[in-house]
Image (cartoon, helix red, strand yellow):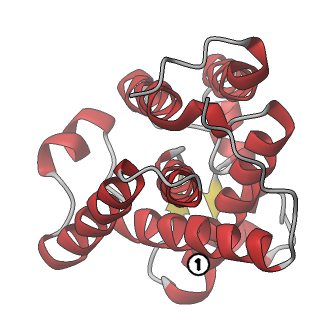
Amino acid sequence: MMSLPYSLKYSLGPLILAFITTLAFFFEPASGQYFAYDRYAIQGLETWRLLTGNLVHTNGYHLLLNLAGVVLLWALHGEHYRAGLYLKVFAWCGLGTSAGLYFYAPDLIWYAGLSGALHGIFAWGACMDILNRMKSGWVLLAGVAFKVIYEQTVGGSADVAALIDAKVAIDAHLFGAMSGVLLFFLMWLTKLPFRKTAK
C-alpha cells in the first residue's frame, strides 16, 4: 500500500479543481445559468459549456459529494497526479463526457457536476496503476466497470437524486469512464512519457 501523495506536486491539481468548483458554487445561480451543460445553448455555439458543465453543481450536497470523490481518487492513485497532467486528464475526460452526452444521449438536455469526469479520472488512474504493475489497478478498473454496468441496467440512486436535487446522469458516468480508458490508450499509443511513479 502506497503512502498518501502529500507532496504539492501531486496534490496541486486536485486542489485547483476543488477551488474552481467551489468558487463556481459561490456564484450560483449565475454560474449554472452560463456554464452548465445545456444542449440547446451548445447548439447555439456556447461550446465552452462542454467543459464548464463539469465545474458547476446543483446544490451544496452535490458539490460536497463530488469533492469527496476528488479526495478519494487522490488517496487511491494520487501518485500519478502531477498537476499539469491531472488537469489535462480532467479536461479531456470532461470534454469526453459532454461529447458523449451530446452525440449519444439526445434526451439529456441539461447536466452539471464533476461525476462524469471523475469516473474518467478513476478509470485513467486504474489503468496507470496497471501500467505500474499494481494489482489493485485491476480491482479498481473492474469496480468502476461494474458500477457503470449496474447503473446502466438498474438506473441511478433515487437517494442521491433526492440529495442533489437532480436526476443522476448515469450516461455521464458511462461516457466519463470510457473517456478515461480511451485517453490512457491514446497517451500510451502515442508514446507520451509514462514514467513509473511507484515509490
Q: Is residue 105 visible?
A: yes
Image quarter (top left, top right, bottom left or bottom right) of the C terminus: top right
Q: Is residue 109 visible?
A: no
Asked if residue 29 lies left or right of residue 148, the reply is right
Residue 101 locus on image (x, y percent)? 55, 75
Asked if residue 44 lies left or right of residue 124, the reply is right
Asked if residue 192 lies left or right of residue 18, the reply is right
At a point 13% along the width and 42% down the height, the residue shown is 159
At a point 80% along the width and 31% down the height, the residue shown is 83
Residue 38 locus on image (x, y percent)? 63, 63
Secondary structure of residue under mark 1: helix
The relative height of residue 84 versus residue 127 in the rendered view (above or below) is above
At a point 58% along the width and 78% down the height, the residue shown is 100
* Quarter where residue 62 is shown: top left
The one nearer the camera, 171 or 186, is 186
Hey, what amino acid is under mark 1? Answer: Gly
Residue 69 locus on image (x, y percent)? 43, 33
At a point 74% along the width and 28% down the height, the residue shown is 13
* Quarter where residue 84 is shown: top right
The relative height of residue 30 versus residue 126 in the rendered view (above or below) is above
Question: Label 1, on which residue?
Answer: 100
The one nearer the camera, 166 or 175, is 175
The one nearer the camera, 109 or 122, is 122
